[in-house]
Amino acid sequence: MSAIAIATFRCTPSGREFLTNFLAGEDGLAITRAYEGALRCEASLSNDNHDVVLYEEWESVEHHQAYVGWRVETGLLDMLSSNGIELEVAYLTPTSI
């Protein structure tokens, strides 16, 4: 069964601009969408604050965690924090309700 990851990036106004530019660039969502185990990735911008939210569907939580581990190794989390961006990830299980 697939896993849903909701990645919420808590941004300052300048952090949101930095993040959206990064996500649209060649090192951003194009890589995420092509990563092993990725099934779907959509970005949304909050209307209430400066947050950026990614809705991601993965083959498994382990696939997503491997991806996040790779992003950590490449320095993405350091880059985010130096731009005033905090990341929160929640995992959801799809249901047929």
Image (cartoon, helix red, strand yellow):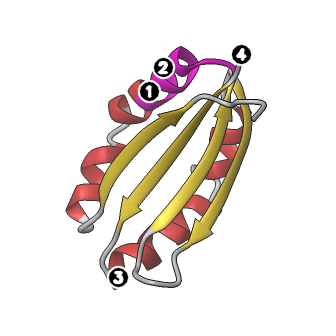
Q: Which mark is residue 14?
A: 3
Q: For residue 3, what is the image quadrant? A: top right
- Between disc 1 and disc 4, whose residue precedes? 4
The picture places residue 95, in percent across and down from the top left corner, at 71, 30
Instruction: Say which residue label 4 marks.
Output: 1
Q: Residue furthest front?
A: 97
- Between disc 2 and disc 3, whose residue precedes? 3
Question: Do tag 1 and tag 4 residues touch (Cβ < 8 Å)?
Answer: no
The structure residue drawn at horizontal position 43% and vertical position 56%, both measured from the top left corner, is 8
Magenta stretch?
Answer: 59-68
Q: Is residue 16 magenta?
A: no
**How far is disc 1 from disc 4 in space, using C-alphas?**
23 Å
Question: Do tag 2 and tag 3 residues touch (Cβ < 8 Å)?
Answer: no
Question: Do tag 4 and tag 3 residues touch (Cβ < 8 Å)?
Answer: no
Instruction: Say which residue label 2 marks.
Output: 66
Most foreground residue, 8 or 93: 93
Q: Which mark is residue 70?
A: 1
